[in-house]
């Protein structure tokens, strides 16, 4: 899967055009809207690869659909990371507990301060573990939306559980993380050259597409795709 993922963005007759467009949109990501198109394109990659269409990556067309998919994935990501974010904020505010305890004085103040430190460490540990779980399951949620076209599937406990515990999905996530690491490493290497700075957004886009392929290929072997129902044209997906 790793080699296929690395080669995937370079397949097809329009691969150069696609990489150029994706790189430019990534470069313009500071304007926010271009990021939505790129995220929507990643959804399209996952959708096609999970369906077995791996001959060549999709092209940039149907921009309205890309924008909608990108916006939906942004909302899914926000929802998944909201709880870890709240826990991290609570852990930071909990720092004031031992500080307040130090002002009480005496043995009671010492106990209060120690309990405060324990509470801070506990909150930080829980926030870290929840955040790690959210990061692991987020691609599964995006893939569930990509495959079914329904936002609700991204938040279905049974759907996410069936994907998250599958070894094929785990393999896809590991490969995706490895590819992103290599892309960042390549970006750090070329940043020291004038030409390399220009190439960074294109390297980033290439790595993200390869990672999306890995997620799509991993999801393809999970119950999410095996049990996928035929879409009902009369039912809205949003």
Image (cartoon, rainbow, N blue to C red):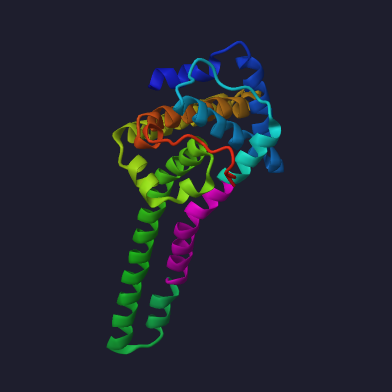
Asked if 66 appears above or below 86 in the picture, the reply is above
**Residue 55: image location, x then y, percent:** 50, 15
Nearer to me, 73 or 95: 73
Residue 166 lies in quadrant: top left
Span highlighted in magenta in the image:
74-94
Residue 12 visible, this orientation: yes
Q: Residue at x 60, y 28 (%)?
A: 200
Q: In the rendered image, which quarter contains the N terminus?
A: top left
Q: Nearer the viewer, residue 168 or 104?
A: 168
Residue sticking out furthest to the top = 13
Task: Identify which residue, 69 or 148, lies in the foreground.
Answer: 148
Would residue 118 be found to the left or right of residue 204 on screen? left
Answer whether residue 182 is visible to the viewer in this image. no
Q: Residue at x 44, y 36 (%)?
A: 229
Query: What residue lies at 41% left-to-right and 53% top-to-bottom?
Result: 131
Q: Is residue 193 magenta?
A: no
Helix, strand or loop for the magenta stretch, by majority: helix
Locate residue 41 relative to residue 207 in the image: left or right: right
């Amino acid at each position: 899967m790793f080699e296929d993922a690395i080669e995937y963005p370079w397949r097809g007759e329009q691969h150069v055009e696609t990489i150029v467009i994706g790189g430019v949109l990534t470069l313009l990501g500071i304007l926010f809207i271009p990021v939505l198109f790129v995220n929507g394109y990643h959804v399209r990659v996952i959708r096609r690869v999970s369906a077995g269409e791996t001959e060549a990556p999709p092209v940039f067309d149907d921009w309205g659909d890309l924008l909608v998919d990108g916006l939906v994935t942004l909302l899914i990501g926000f929802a998944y990371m909201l709880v870890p974010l709240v826990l991290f904020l609570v852990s930071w505010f909990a720092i004031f507990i031992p500080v307040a305890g130090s002002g009480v004085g005496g043995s009671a103040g010492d106990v209060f301060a120690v309990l405060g430190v324990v509470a801070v460490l506990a909150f930080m540990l829980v926030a870290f573990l929840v955040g790690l779980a959210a990061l692991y399951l987020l691609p599964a949620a995006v893939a569930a939306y990509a495959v079914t076209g329904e936002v609700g599937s991204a938040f279905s406990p049974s759907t996410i559980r069936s994907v998250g515990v599958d070894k094929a999905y785990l393999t896809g996530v590991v490969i995706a993380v490895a590819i992103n690491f290599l892309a960042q490493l390549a970006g750090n290497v070329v940043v020291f050259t004038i030409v390399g700075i220009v190439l960074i957004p294109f390297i980033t886009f290439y790595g993200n597409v390869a990672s999306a392929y890995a997620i799509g290929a991993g999801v393809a072997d999970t119950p999410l795709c095996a049990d996928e129902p035929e879409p009902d044209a009369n039912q809205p997906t949003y």
